[in-house]
Amino acid sequence: FVLMQHAFGPLELHTVVLARTMQPAWQRHGQQLQRPRSHRGVAAGALGLAACAALFSNVLSFASVAGRTRSRLTAHTTSASDKDSSSSGGLHRVFGQRGSLVVAAASSSAAWILPTVDKDIGEFHSGRADKYAWVQTSDTVYIFAPYSSKDGKEKPDVQLEVQNEGTLIRLTIEGEDAVKGKLSHQLKPGSDVWMIEEAADGNAFAVVEIDKLVPGIEWTSVVQPNVKFSESYTNELQIELQTITDDEKNAAVDETLGHLQRKHAKLQTADSAYQAGNGDLLTINMKGFELGPGDARGALLDIATASGLKLTLGASGQAGAGLLPEVHQQLVGIKLNETRDVKVTLGSRAGSLGGQTILCAMTCTKLQQQTLLELTDEFARVVKRAEQMIQAGTMEGIPEEEYGRADTITLEELRGEIATEILYTIQKQEREAVYNMMEAELLKAIEVDCDWATPSLQSRNDAEKLAHGERLATVLNAVAQKEGLLSRLDEDKIQKRAWDSLGEPKPGETVAEVGKDPAREFQTAHRKVFRKEQRELVLGWLEERVAVVAKGAVVAQARARVE
């Protein structure tokens, strides 16, 4: 040991008992999960040459896995004397072994301080149940259950069973079930490892580490939700569908044509007498001032200053330079080289000035007037050519029946196409309204009990939204299984659509790039496509049993019965 200190320096293997050859198999130790700290209590006594050799071997094994959170080199297959610890025949290790273990953690899992594990867990959902907590990475699931030695015995009373090809789990601590049930997703058989770990507050946990059978799947619960159907139920949906009159349809067509006119408008330099209107392109120089008495300019500010700022008057988002609608309204009528003092209320990005109203002196240095194309057959052809240019860049391409149509389409035919699209959009909205109501009724009729995960730090969902989405997906899947609908889903088609979605560039990008976790990206895309297909399948099946009437009738009585 002294020779190794000279060779390797002070050993910082947190509470790792190195003299494993001097201990029974169930006490053999491995690498600690927490950040290493000063070693406390290497087994004392004379070490013979054989013991030194075994000790040196352990140090090399420990060093060879530096950088990993855990090493399985020090874990061992359950022997005949260990079978009571793991009936699954997996692996287990004991860490931080001392004369007696500390008392279990606080009763509420929300207050538990867990032992540190993989650094990537913050990127994934995690969860807290009554008797256990869990975290995950793309490849592994970690389960924590409080442990305390009630009678002072040294050998941990922990039993872990992973059965049925990694679909069932049972974790027992001191004779009480901590986790028991059918797993949400399949685990890799034979990869299960358990250990006793100490958290930063001194509380001890039995920690289970198991590899996912399919890497990349993000779990939202450890155990499958418990689903309970009513013995029989009938959903009566009161649905009032929208109708559209000819006048409303024609007004919508005219509004769409006006939008297309503005989209394909030409810009020409305006003269000094021209007053800017919505749709015109302005180039602005801007300076910010404090708002003084009587709306006069106060001190010059070092914010709200810009030069050569281009904006389309009346537009929102990037086209409108990100300026608020009230700013655009104050610029309507501005002339070339005119300066206007515009009131602007600053947002949170302005720091200490956030929420304050200031004056922006805006000078129009360039003004391009928007000239709309006349509504003629030629205009219809300009619109169709632009539409087909976009279609040509897609995988589907230009529809065969559309070949040559850009040279022959008339304005009246364009109006007809727009009217058809408007009706189609209304039908989609009607169908989505029916689907939403059917989902609401299913959620009332089918009980789901589950300890759902807490969203990851990167997730856009809050806990309530995540739980609602998972509960709805569970209900739809339960109906699909009960009614024998799952066989209608085409897995090859789902996988192809998942791959296709991964090949689409993200907004603002021109090329789709592979991220740091391709397996997770594919599984996320697959889940999204699968759930969409399953929703269409189940709700479409229910829709066949729905009677729909148009607006003006009493209501639609939509009935669906699931035995």
Image (cartoon, rainbow, N blue to C red):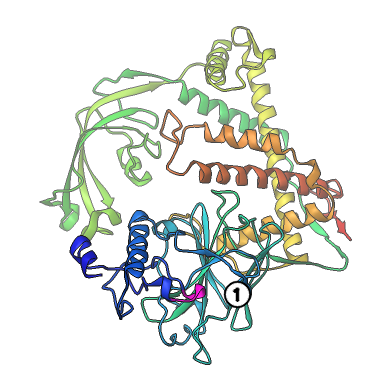
Query: Was residue 25 drawn as part of the magenta stretch in this picture?
Result: yes
Q: Quadrant of residue 557?
A: bottom right
Q: Quadrant of residue 12?
A: bottom left
Query: Residue visible at 35% across and 54% down?
Result: 64
Instruction: Give the percent coordinates (x, y) of residue 128.
Output: 53, 71
Q: Quadrant of residue 222?
A: bottom right
Instruction: Give the percent coordinates (x, y) of residue 183.
Output: 66, 62
Q: From what the image shows, is residue 448 above or below residue 67?
A: below
Amino acid identity at mark 1: Ser
- Dominant SS in magenta: helix
Extreme residue in the bottom direction = 151
Query: Residue visible at 39% across and 32% down?
Result: 278
Q: Which residue is mark 1?
A: 81
Q: From what the image shows, is residue 108 above or below residue 8?
A: below
Instruction: Give the percent coordinates (x, y) of residue 120.
Output: 41, 56
Q: Is residue 96 left or right of residue 288?
A: right
Query: Was residue 211 drawn as part of the magenta stretch in this picture?
Result: no
Q: Quadrant of the C terminus?
A: bottom right
| Residue toward you, 79 or 441 | 79
Instruction: Give the percent coordinates (x, y) of residue 62.
Output: 36, 60
Query: Residue visible at 68% across and 13% down?
Result: 400
| Residue toward you, 1 or 476 | 1
- Magenta stretch in the rendered image: 23-27
| Residue toward you, 132 or 442 | 132
Extreme residue in the front direction = 49
Q: From what the image shows, is residue 152 above or below residue 26?
A: below
Mark 1 neighbour density, 10 Å: few (under 14) some (14–19) many (20 or more): few
Query: Residue visible at 32% across and 44% down?
Result: 327
Q: Quadrant of the N terminus?
A: bottom left
Q: Is residue 418 left or right of residue 316?
A: right
